[in-house]
Image: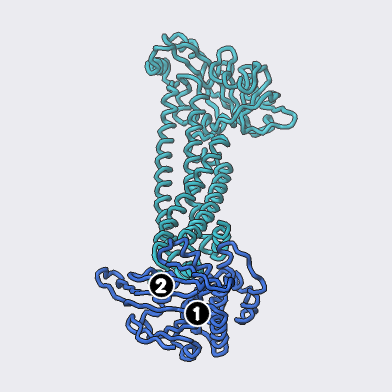
Amino acid sequence: MDILAESISYKYFRKGKKKEAIFELLNISLELKEGELTGIIGHSGSGKSTLLNILSGALTPVTGTVKTKERGDISNGYREAGIVTDLYSLNDRERSRFRNRHIGIIPQDRSALGHLTVYENIILPLKMYGEMIPEKYTEKIISDLGLERVKREPAVSLSGGEVRRLSVARALIGRPEIILADEPTGDLDQDNRRVVLEILKQLSKEGKTVLMVTHDKEAESYADRIYRIENGAVISDQL
Amino acid sequence: MKFIIELAIKNIKGRGRRSSALVLLTALLSASLFGGTVTVRSLQNGLRSYEARLGADIIVTPWEAVKEGKLESILIQGAPGYFYMEDSLLEEIRQIEGVDAISPQFYLSSASSGCCDTLVQIIGFDPDTDFSVQPWIRESYSQSLGDGDVIVGWNIRVPENRHFRFYNVDCTVVARLDKTGTGLDSAIYANMNTIKQMMESADDIGFTYFKDVDVKKAVSSILVNVKEGYDTGKIVSEINRLSKDVSATSTKDMVSSVADGLSGISKLVGILIVFTWILGTAILVVSFAMMVNERVSELAALRNIGGSKAMLSGILIAEAVIVSFTGGAVGTALTGLVIITFADTLKNSIGLPLLLSGSGYITIMVICSILVSVAVCAVTSSVCAFRITSKDTGLILREGK
């Protein structure tokens, strides 16, 4: 599933200053392709996370569209036209369901539900819409991310790195076609950084659309395509 | 829906202290509403019951009894007491124009010594002339009360052999009266012959109840009914002119003095309920707002994994409803227990008749109190939930940071 973002702009107002609009993103267009690990790099405050939130359907842009496009079925020997979904033409319920089913988000901040166990946090996206829990797959993710030891612990007791790995596991549990990761290697030690990056790389090889917003030089080296953002605009796009 | 409720319950359990504080607050709110309304209603019932049990237009008692508030003490609080005057007034009152019927009553307090089984108020009436006691005694005992027979008030403990002995006079309990919420629940009723026998026996034993009054001619009060069309106030004045040692009081005045006390208490309870609810609701608004602000990243996480705005609002509202329902149930249950346990203490401390309402009214009030608590919490949390979920997730996170 590809993501096509066209002419995305986003502005916000400083708290208490309704007339002072600051453009965070200005007329950005980009394409995230199925089977590719795309990196977005840039300085702090350049608008990387805002762009990721817009691509996930969590932040409505001032202008522009975000569309997802399925590649289509080739089982009949020819490719059928894929379904195009305009994320912001969906209502909240539809967009939320779409996000749950097709997009896995690894957020930048500590975003676990502290009083739930690690396991309960990981399966939350499936429980949310009453879906079956694939126990073997869940155990594999937990094992791959080195979370077996803390599986039954409440998330509040985890270290920053463990929460980050929990976020990765939760993003992958629903086998989404799109993975959007905001600083996925933040808080992680060298070994776990590699584990997470390898997982993201492997996912892209399996045909997933993976986007990674990062500062990490090592992470950049895993990307198939890199967009560099500065002052709210894409200044380079390199393969 | 299943997910929303499951997660709401886990959230409540996971935040034990905060949830307990909210349960306590909603318990306090429902307790104030339930306790306040049931108490006022019970006082109103007591007043109606008191008015009904007086059963006469005028009560004539010795002046001393009025001065010391002995009659109210017997009738409302059930404190055993006695006072006497000569029965010569009976004929004089009967002669007053406008008097329809009169009947004497006798109040005797049993003693705690060996001649009596228990300390109670004994009330005697003349079966031939009585118009005040017998109509409601008949609700529990349809036959006429024979010599040596007694009927007990609701609060009196009856021994297994159904026999009492007062001033060495043996009595048999033949019936128990319904609860009135007044002092009459702690009294025993006997006919004139039985109580006269007790009074004379008490005098013989040496109890100095009767002072200057001849025990054979002693009566405690005279109940008077006024003919229709006659002014009760004028007849009260005429009776008071007959003797400076007695006092005639219109029962309406007696009831209205009790009603005045009740009205003051009702206002006070009303003000307390309103004040508690205003304060409680304000605390709830602040608590929910703080709770939502603290949980910004948790709510954003739920949005990220596909939770819709309606789902998030549902979780927050479900938490509020579960907490307030629990608080409401705890508050009404504990208050109900306190009211039932301390009803008599409350009655005695405020000096007003108090008759608890029936189970139907109590059930309705329990449901209403819980529903109001739940509704207030649900609305309050909805407002907070709407405030947070009306924004984009990205914006919530940015503001949270």
The residue nearer to you, when weighing B122 against B323, is B323
Q: Nearer the viewer, mark 2 or mark 1?
A: 1
**Which hue is chain A drawn in?**
blue
Residue plotted at (45% across, 19% down): B57
Chain ID of residue with mark 2: A
- State how far apart marks 2 and 1 are (Cα): 15 Å
User: Quarter holding the N terminus of chain B?
Assistant: bottom right
Q: Quadrant of residue A151?
A: bottom right
Horizontal relation, residue B255 to residue A151: left or right:
left
Residue A181 seen by the camera: no
- Dividing the picture into quadrants, the one containing residue B296 is bottom left
Q: Which residue is mark 2?
A: A54
**Nearer to the camera, A169 or B172:** A169
- Look at label 2 and name its amino acid: Ile
Q: What is the display colour for chain B?
A: cyan
Image quarter (top left, top right, bottom left or bottom right) of the C terminus of chain B: bottom left
> Residue B256: where, in percent of width, then height?
41, 28
Color encoding of the figure? by chain
Q: Residues within 10 Å of mark 2 (few under 14, many from 20)?
A: many
Q: Are marks 2 and 1 in contact (CB under 8 Å)?
A: no
Residue topped by disc 1 = A210
Q: Is residue A161 above or below residue B243?
A: below
Badge 2 or badge 1: first in the primary sequence:
2
Q: Amino acid at mark 1?
A: Val
| Residue displayed at 54% across by 81% down | A204
